[in-house]
Image (cartoon, helix red, strand yellow):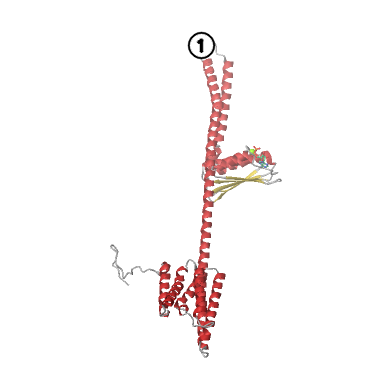
């Protein structure tokens, strides 16, 4: 443990450790250290002569210890190589077989302890069926080693035999169980990461869907705004034409007639006043003025019916009173809508009541208006024959277009035999 001075600008608040390499973060270092350890521990077991035998022992122990370096990339191959070397050791390096002393260089050494390490690695990182096969191979190898070793022992050493067998089998089993439990942990982590990835993918998909919906909505609103602008431009053109072709022409005629009357009332010297003609001209001018007035009143009513000045409730109530089919008004609005929305609701109700009178054959109609959150809900119901539909270019289609310009909705339910219910939903404020 070494203490380091506090970094400049920071208050020193106790001893600090220098960064030591962590084994988990340096697996190659760990494996290298293990290989060196196994190799050096086997050192004392090498034969002291002859030189060829020493070299063979060094090579075999080096190979065995070296397999640990390959365990992370090729665990099965590393274990197979170690088991193959151990098999050679069992056959040639253990108790006398057919005769002759065992080859000293091939006797098992501490380096064989690499086998449980490799078995652990296979169990931890390879599928169960492979790791079970590896365990069986290790247990068979242990049995073979004991079988080769036992005959050389004194007959009374059955305890030693049992301890050796249990030790080898126990080591193999322990290594496998440890590795397998590690694999279980890895699998659990893997499944958890899969689940997390799936959840993330789902969240991403949801976000994509929401973005697509928002883009679609933006396109719709853009469309409606364009239609609203077109509609108001068309309305302005219609009003301008009506004023130009109607009221303006009539007022010009009125001015001319009044000019003639003025001339008649102030005749040139020597010309008598023609009372009859003047009376006719005054009567024509009067008629013209009355018609112009009516025309202007109709025009103004088309833009904004004066009855709406008193609010939506009274305007609808007067609509219901003057409806050709007896109509009842049910009003449940806590807060009045904005004037533009009131205008729209009024025109919708007027068109729908006109439809009831024209098409339904109903005996009774109802207009209901209520608040729903920030929306105004209006339904016009009749007990007529049903069959109302949104026909292109018709009044209902026109209403739908109109309410859509303020993000409203219109829904027609009119099964054959009735009743007909037209529902209109508008924002309270345009
Ligand atoms: N209240 C109603 N009852 C029965 N039929 C209706 C009703 N309202 C509309 N319709 C039917 O739906 C059609 C479409 O109505 P609309 O779009 O208002 O067109 P129109 O200009 O003919 O009134 C009408 O022609 C009529 O046949
Ligand atoms: Mg209609």
Q: Residue furthest right?
A: 417
Lateral position of residue 40 relative to residue 153, left or right? left
- Who is closer to the viewer here, 89 or 42? 89
Residue on which the image places disc 1:
268
* Secondary structure under the numbered disc 1 in the rendered image: loop
Lateral position of residue 8 relative to residue 231, left or right? left
Q: Residue at x 57, y 32 (%)?
A: 298
- Who is closer to the viewer here, 288 or 401? 401
Lateral position of residue 367 relative to residue 59, left or right? right
Q: Quadrant of residue 111?
A: bottom left
User: Is the residue 202 above or below the residue 349 in the image?
Assistant: below
User: Is the residue 294 above or below the residue 362 in the image?
Assistant: above
Q: In this view of the protein, can residue 408 be seen by the observer? A: yes
Q: Residue furthest top?
A: 270
Task: State which image quarter holds ligand 2.
Answer: top right
Q: Is mark 1 within 8 Å of ligand 1?
A: no
- Who is closer to the viewer here, 284 or 299? 299
Task: Quadrant for the N terminus, please.
Answer: bottom left
Question: Percent from the top left, x then y, of residue 281?
Answer: 57, 19
Q: Residue at x 52, y 62 (%)?
A: 194
Q: Residue at x 50, y 85 (%)?
A: 163
Question: Percent from the top left, x then y, of residue 378?
Answer: 59, 46
Question: Percent from the top left, x then y, of residue 223?
Answer: 54, 41
Q: In this view of the protein, can residue 321 be seen by the observer? A: no
């Amino acid at each position: 443990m070494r203490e380091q001075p506090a970094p400049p600008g920071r208050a020193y608040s106790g001893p600090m450790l220098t960064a030591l390499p962590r084994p988990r973060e340096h697996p190659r270092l760990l494996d290298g250290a293990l290989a060196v350890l196994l190799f050096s521990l086997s050192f004392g077991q090498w034969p002291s002569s002859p030189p060829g035998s020493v070299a063979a022992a060094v090579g075999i122990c080096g190979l065995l210890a070296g397999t640990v370096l390959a365990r992370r990339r090729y665990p099965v191959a590393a274990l197979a190589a170690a088991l193959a070397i151990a098999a050679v050791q069992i056959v040639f390096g253990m108790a006398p077989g057919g005769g002759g002393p065992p080859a000293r260089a091939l006797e098992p050494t501490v380096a064989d302890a690499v086998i449980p390490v490799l078995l652990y690695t296979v169990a931890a990182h390879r599928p169960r069926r492979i790791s079970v096969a590896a365990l069986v191979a290790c247990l068979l190898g242990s049995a073979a080693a004991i079988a080769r070793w036992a005959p050389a022992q004194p007959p009374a050493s059955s305890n030693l035999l049992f301890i050796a067998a249990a030790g080898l089998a126990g080591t193999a089993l322990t290594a496998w169980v440890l590795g397998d439990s590690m694999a279980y942990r890895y699998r659990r982590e893997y499944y958890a990461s899969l689940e997390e990835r799936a959840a993330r993918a789902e969240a991403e998909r949801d976000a994509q869907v929401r973005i697509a919906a928002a883009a679609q909505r933006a396109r719709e609103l853009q469309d409606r705004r364009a239609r609203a602008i077109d509609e108001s431009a068309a309305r302005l053109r219609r009003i301008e034409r009506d004023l130009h072709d109607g009221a303006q022409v009539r007022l010009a005629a009125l001015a001319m007639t009044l000019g003639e009357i003025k001339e008649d009332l102030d005749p040139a010297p020597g010309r008598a006043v023609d009372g009859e003609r003047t009376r006719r001209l005054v009567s024509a001018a009067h008629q013209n003025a009355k018609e112009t007035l009516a025309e202007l009143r109709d025009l103004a009513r088309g833009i904004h019916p004066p009855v709406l000045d008193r609010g939506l409730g009274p305007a609808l109530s007067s609509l219901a009173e003057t409806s050709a089919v007896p109509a009842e008004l049910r009003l449940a609005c806590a807060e009045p809508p904005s004037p533009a929305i009131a205008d729209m609701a009024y025109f919708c109700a007027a068109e729908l009541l006109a439809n009831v009178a024209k098409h339904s054959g109903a005996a009774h109609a109802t207009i209901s208006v209520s608040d729903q959150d920030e929306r105004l809900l209006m339904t016009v119901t009749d007990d007529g024959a049903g069959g109302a539909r949104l026909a292109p270019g018709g009044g209902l289609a026109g209403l739908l277009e109109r309410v859509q310009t303020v993000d409203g909705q219109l829904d027609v339910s009119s099964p054959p035999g009735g009743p007909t219910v037209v529902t209109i939903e508008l924002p309270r404020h345009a």
